[in-house]
Image (spheres, rainbow, N blue to C red):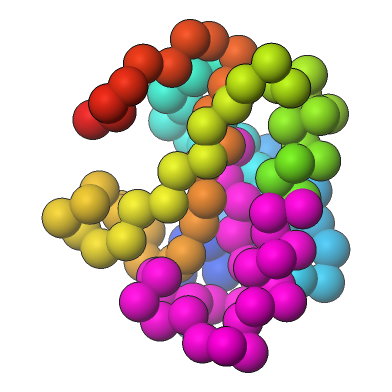
Amino acid sequence: MRGCIFCQIVRGDAPARLVHQDDEITAFHDANPQAPVHLLIVPNRHIEGVRDVTPGDAPALGRLFVVARQLAEAFDLLDGYRLVVNDGPAAGQSVPHLHVHLLGARSLSWPPG
């Protein structure tokens, strides 16, 4: 999707501090971090949100969680971290491209938000 900022980041058309990129998944530092480590992990193919996921997306989404675990290890977060997925504006999704927030390196309280 041409106007999607995350699609632009995936293509290299918008700046971001990338920490991972492969054929299916891209990960980068959040521009407005809410924790000392706050990464966004996105499928390279534009999927607007969870409500738009199809069975064909399962391999990429499985890969997304593998990358999340690898990044947690790389950023030394194995004592604990949080993965967050917001779906839709009422849930706080500000960019309409499916993404997972990886948050860590501080105590995370419950319930969030």
Decide whether residue 93 is among the magenta residues. no
Relative to 72, residue 46 above or below: below
Task: Provide residue 80's location: percent of width, then percent of height.
Answer: 62, 21
Q: Quadrant of residue 18?
A: top right
Between 69 and 3, the one lying in front of the other is 69
Task: Provide residue 60's location: percent of width, then percent of height.
Answer: 70, 73
Residue 16 appears anywhere in the view? no
Relative to 99, residue 70 above or below: above
Viewport quadrant of the C terminus: top left
**Residue at 36% from the left image edge and 66% from the top image edge:** 96
Residues rendered magenta in the picture: 39-66
Q: Quadrant of residue 77?
A: top right
Task: Provide residue 105's location: percent of width, then percent of height.
Answer: 60, 14
Relative to 32, residue 99 above or below: below
Q: Is residue 23 left or right of residue 101?
A: right
Q: Is residue 90 left or right of residue 39?
A: left
**Residue at 39% from the left image edge and 70% from the top image edge:** 49
Between 60 and 37, the one lying in front of the other is 60
In the image, farthest residue toward the top: 107
